Amino acid sequence: MTDAQSIKVRIRKKDGRKQYVMYYVDPVTGKQKGHRSTGKQMKREAERIAAKWEKDLQAGIHAAPQRMGWEDFRLYYRTNHLDYLRQKSIETQEAGLNMVERILDPQSLAVIDKKAVLRLKKELVAMGRSPNTVNRILRSLKCAMRWAKNHDILQTVPLIEMIKVTGRKAKGRGLTDDEFEALLDAALEVRPDDAERWQRLLRGCRYTGLRLNDLLKLRWDNKTGFHLDLSDLYPVIRIAGESQKNGKNEVLPVSPQAEAVFLETPQDQRQGFVFDLSAEVTPEGKNRDDKNTSRKISAMGEAAGIVVCEKKGKFASCHDIRDTFGTWIASKGISPYELQRMMRHADLKTTMEFYVDVQAQDMNANIRKLLGAAICDPIRDPFTTYGGAQTNTEKQNVSISR
């Protein structure tokens, strides 16, 4: 194995460039690697920058490309990249790499080639992981390998193709009014001691359309970057840029029904979390973990006997309550762009799925308005209508035209 100490950094000026460029010769392949600007026009200053990079290389930070062990890379990747991301992003990336480690057990980053990626994908599918889950794990690996290449730890990144997901896989559906009432009743069975708090949480989800983890972060004050503002004519939900991935500040409108849920809390009690699950607060002062809360809501869906996916035998969950909000708002005539904002969808295509049934019903209404309210009964007579049976001549003319 080539010693890292054999790596030497050199500098030179490219034609037409004012600043010196530094690079090194890969002791494994003999090829020039890592061409980057020193940012300096004076040779002595450029040599200082190059010397520092050479020291890093020889210390093993970038040494012997593709020879860094998997465990060393995981630690280096975590401390130099992941730790600067949001906690949710860190958890997603780490979970994906943990699954890669579990299946492939790589000794180094270099052994993960195209064949290894195909094996990883095959094993994940065989384990029953959904296409979206498989793609999430593949994206974690792809991000890590691209980062490694950009930092001269890896020479090439193998082809990592995602599984093509066609259409939205039906995992659930929105609830009817009767089903939602049954879900509220089931809270009395699943959480008899604090059912009122959980019923309020269910109604908050039903009328805000927020994801559960966002709903649990919502506060009367601004300590989490998610807070309810009642100071203006209409209430809004303010989201600080640092509390979300896109880094943008957002202000979300609130439905009148959601406002009514909020105002149930007396003014002198409006502090802390809006949906306060006091018994569930963690030692760190955080509201109950959304995964545990989600399990409780799913238990309520099962207790109520609300099956939202016959094929999977899936009972109503918090996601189905959120879908209920989307379908309900879409049916009221709100524009897709407004609904996209309220539901915080990154892609308008996701929002448009709530309009499929609504648009079909609107089209049916328009067709009946234009062509009459006649409804065929194919069992009795394909031409019988509520407006009276057609004549034989009319039937014959229709048949001929067909």
Image (spheres, rainbow, N blue to C red):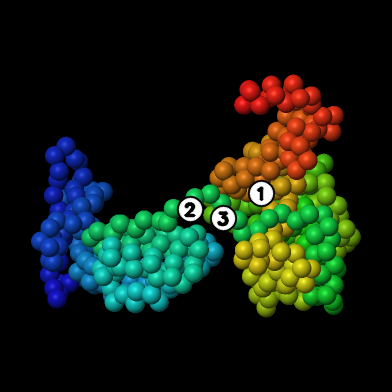
Tell me where residue 219 sits by quadrant.
bottom right
Q: Is residue 121 left or right of residue 157?
A: right
Which residue is painted at 83% across and 46% down in the image? 256
Disc 2 or disc 1, which is closer to the eye? 2
Q: Which mark is residue 50?
A: none
- Determine crowd level at label 3: few under 14, some 14-19, many 20+ residues with C-alpha closer than 10 A: few
Circle 3: element type: loop
Residue 84 seen? no
Marks 2,3: beta carbons within 8 A: yes
Q: Residue furthest left?
A: 30
Q: Is residue 331 left or right of residue 118?
A: right
Q: Which residue is mark 1?
A: 343
For the residues marked 2 and 1, what is the alpha-carbon distance in whole angstroms? Answer: 22 Å
Marks 3,1: beta carbons within 8 A: no
Q: Position of residue 248 (x, y in %)?
A: 57, 47
Which residue is painted at 12% across and 63% down in the image? 29
Q: Which residue is mark 2?
A: 165
Query: In the picture shown, does residue 214 fall above or below 16?
Result: below
Q: Which residue is mark 3?
A: 169
Circle 1: element type: helix
- Determine crowd level at label 1: few under 14, some 14-19, many 20+ residues with C-alpha closer than 10 A: many
Q: Is residue 172 left or right of residue 31?
A: right
> Which quarter of the image is occupied by the C terminus?
top right
Q: Position of residue 339 (x, y in %)?
A: 68, 43
Disc 3 or disc 1, which is closer to the eye? 3
Q: Position of residue 381 (x, y in %)?
A: 76, 37
Amino acid at dot 2 = Val
Marks 2,1: beta carbons within 8 A: no
Q: Mark 3 or mark 1: name the one nearer the start of the chain.
A: 3
Amino acid at dot 3 = Lys
Which residue is painted at 83% across and 64% down in the image? 182
